[in-house]
Image (cartoon, helix red, strand yellow):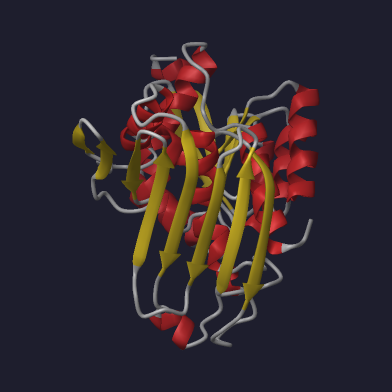
């Protein structure tokens, strides 16, 4: 796929902030991939994006992009309430797909998507790109090697103040209970819960308490949860979007040491053992989805297995649904 004439031609549905810096440049930079077209619902947005990013084609509808025989694969970068419908259309067109996280509106929709792509024998990726970032790969290696011993407990706390847009009650899919009943939890906690599964294995049991403390929007803004992993590790987590304090801290406790790190940002991770302390760099590549998109190319070439496919992403939705009490 190195030659441009043999590149896998991608189309992107949705031209929002994620595509501007995080993802679209990655599809243009990875050998064997070519960004061929974009679509957007807002009139003129696809043309503007295509012009600024030197994308050959733009479309006024997602269906037109999906139907184009010059598009081989589709990246769905729209809000999650449209993921299932669009993914099924991509499968119907017999095309490779990548879906922005979370994979769908709920676990039931994830199952439907997963079954459809399995039946069609089509590759399906989900943009939990942190699984491919070098820092989290290092943390996983440290845990798997037994550096801190047998894992016993994990905790994650994330809090931040309401944004100016929240205070102005500006419309936002992330705060609309009809799209994201958990509010920012579904956008941000999905990344962290997925990473915890990546590092520690699948979750066997999850339960939560959810509420709205501020009354600024219809979705939840405060959530706490308890977790039990299949390997016996226990966990607890909390997310609060009504606090004055920004905090993002994960602590993995084991019988011979511990690891502390943040899900977001690029602050170093710290490993503590009786033999001393170690710091791991958590660099943020530019574009941040670069390693994730490169891993897709490697997977399709048969070089290595991609870390974020339908099964793991669907499991993350299952965890969230259990915490939110909708499953």
Look at the image and tell me in which quarter the N terminus lies.
Answer: top left
On the image, the x and y values in percent for residue 147 come to 34, 27
Where residue 91 sits in the image (x, y, percent)?
Answer: 74, 33
Instruction: Find residue 16 and report its horizontal and vertical position in percent.
Output: 47, 58
Task: Tell me which corner region of the image, top left, top right, bottom left or bottom right, holds residue 293.
Answer: top left
The image position of residue 113, as x and y in percent, is: 75, 39
Q: Is residue 180 above or below residue 106?
A: below
Q: Nearer the viewer, residue 26 or 184?
A: 184
Left or right: 280 with respect to 297?
A: left
Q: Is residue 323 left or right of residue 11?
A: right
Relative to the observer, which residue lies in front, 138 or 225?
225
The residue depicted at 58 percent of the width and 88 percent of the height is 215
Q: Answer yes or no: is residue 55 visible.
A: no
Image height of 150 relative to 82, above or below:
above
The answer to which quarter of the image holds residue 163 is bottom left
Dividing the picture into quarters, in which one does residue 174 lie? bottom right
Residue shown at 68%/58% (left/top)? Answer: 207
> Is residue 307 visible in the rendered structure shown here?
yes
Residue at 79% across / 48% down in the picture? 108
Q: Could you tell whether 182 is left or right of 300 in the image?
A: right
For the point 64% across and 80% down, which residue is it? 218
């Amino acid at each position: 796929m190195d030659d441009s004439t043999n590149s896998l031609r991608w189309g992107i549905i949705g031209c929002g902030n994620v595509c501007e810096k995080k993802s679209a440049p990655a599809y243009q930079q990875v050998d064997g991939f070519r960004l061929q077209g974009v679509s957007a619902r807002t009139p003129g947005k696809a043309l503007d994006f295509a012009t600024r990013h030197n994308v050959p084609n733009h479309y006024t509808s997602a269906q037109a992009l999906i139907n184009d025989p010059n598009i081989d694969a589709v990246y769905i970068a729209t809000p999650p309430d449209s993921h299932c419908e669009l993914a099924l259309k991509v499968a119907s067109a017999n095309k490779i797909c990548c879906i922005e996280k979370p994979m769908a509106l709920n676990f039931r929709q994830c199952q439907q998507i997963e079954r459809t792509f399995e039946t069609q024998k089509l590759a399906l990726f989900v943009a939990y790109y942190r699984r491919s970032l070098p820092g989290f790969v290092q943390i996983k290696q440290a845990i798997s090697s037994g550096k801190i011993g047998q894992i016993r407990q994990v905790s994650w706390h994330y809090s931040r103040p309401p944004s100016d847009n929240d205070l102005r009650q500006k419309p936002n899919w992330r705060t609309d209970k009809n799209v994201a009943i958990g509010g920012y939890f579904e956008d941000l906690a999905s990344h962290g819960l997925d990473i915890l599964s990546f590092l520690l294995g699948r979750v066997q049991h999850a339960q939560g308490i959810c509420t709205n403390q501020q009354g600024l929007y219809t979705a939840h803004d405060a959530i706490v949860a308890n977790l039990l992993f299949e390997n016996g590790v226990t966990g607890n987590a909390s997310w609060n979007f009504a606090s004055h304090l920004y905090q993002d801290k994960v602590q993995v406790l084991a019988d011979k040491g511990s690891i502390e790190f943040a899900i977001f940002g690029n602050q170093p991770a710290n490993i503590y053992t009786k033999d001393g302390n170690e710091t791991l760099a958590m660099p943020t590549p530019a574009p941040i989805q670069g390693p994730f998109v490169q891993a897709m190319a490697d997977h399709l070439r048969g070089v290595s297995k991609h870390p974020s496919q339908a099964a793991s992403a669907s499991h993350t939705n299952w965890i969230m649904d259990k915490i939110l009490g909708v499953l």
